[in-house]
Amino acid sequence: MPKVKINNIEIEYETIGDPTSKPLLLIAGLGSQLLAWSDEICENLADRGFFVIRFDNRDIGLSTKFEDAGLPNFMEINTAYTRGELPKVPYNLEDMADDAIGVLDALNIDKAHICGASMGGMIAQVIAYKHPSRVRSLTIIMSTTGNPTLPQAKPEIMAQFFAPVPSERETYIEEMVKRDSLIQGTFAYDEDQGRDYRTKEYDRSYYPEGIARQLAAMAVPGNIKPKISAIQAPTLVIHGREDPFNSIEAGKEIASTIPGAELLILDGMGHSFPREIMPRIINALVMNSNKNCN
């Protein structure tokens, strides 16, 4: 896969489909490599007329790691906010949004359809208000504005999902398969598919340190709700009714704040991409992209 130099770092990316088709940039969530957008999803999107671009966010996968920055001090981050100050972090969501734009620059793409999931959805929102001329349409999946007044994630799920993970390969894979089943929603969890994904992820790049710094990046610029009201791109918000991380209220807030945004709530969907609902997600994304053919 190719790399591109952006903002003094390297970002690993991959393209799927015909370069003359509609460009679609997929942005992964917290701690997720480009593999989170599976080959099956990307190929289906390519078959629907997109030139699909997926990439590793900074500090994960095969993109540049920020080892010298060390691990963030979340107590200091919280203290800064209580003082009304922006916390000091190695990088923030705006930096990550600029990385995504840099990938488009490397491919000589002036304007693309943007789709992000979870943290990737936050990055997509930042792109849409910071770089509006680069966005043809916007699809935001299982994400949030970072508004602290929104209902918080289920504490029992957070405690299990973000507990320390073993570093030994087989133990790590089995533990992550177990955790992934907790956020599936009401759909049956495919353990074989989950194990295959976590195995590929581990073998490609096992790097848990980056997750902590990405989590810190989500603290800045903080609550982006006031900024997303300026977004003019055709916007689709997709959210699972059973999402244990970002409540359904988070999806509703995004859709009600961005002018003209459409909200698609999927029953049974948690914080994941069950195979059963992917056709609905892809169909909705295609319809949203057709609202702007420029």
Image: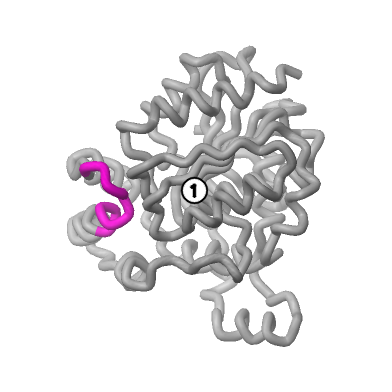
Towards the viewer: 32 or 269: 269
The figure's colour scheme reads one colour
**Above-or-below relation of 182 to 255:** below
Q: Give how far across and how far down residue 25 sits, in percent.
A: 60, 33
The residue located at (70%, 58%) in the rendering is 225
**Would residue 94 be seen by someone viewing this image from the given angle?**
yes
Quarter of the image for residue 289 reads top right
**Above-or-below relation of 75 to 261:** below
Towards the viewer: 255 or 246: 255
Q: Give how far across and how far down residue 118 sits, in percent.
A: 51, 51
The residue located at (26%, 42%) in the rendering is 187
The crowding category of the residue bearing disc 1, from other C-alpha atoms within 10 Å (few below 14, some 14 to 19, many at least 20), is many
- Image quadrant in which the C terminus is located: top right
Residue marked by disc 1: 142
- Left or right, 164 with respect to 280, comes to left
Towards the viewer: 206 or 244: 244
**Above-or-below relation of 177 to 104:** below
Q: How many marks?
A: 1
Q: Is residue 184 magenta?
A: yes
The residue located at (68%, 22%) in the rendering is 291
Q: Is residue 131 magenta?
A: no
Which region shows up in magenta? 179-188
Q: Give how far across and how far down residue 256 sits, in percent.
A: 66, 48
**Would residue 64 be seen by someone viewing this image from the given angle?**
no
Find numbered disc 1 in the image and state the secondary structure of the residue it sits on.
loop
Q: Give how far across and how far down residue 260 sits, in percent.
A: 71, 36
Three-letter amino acid code at disc 1? Met
The residue located at (52%, 43%) in the rendering is 141
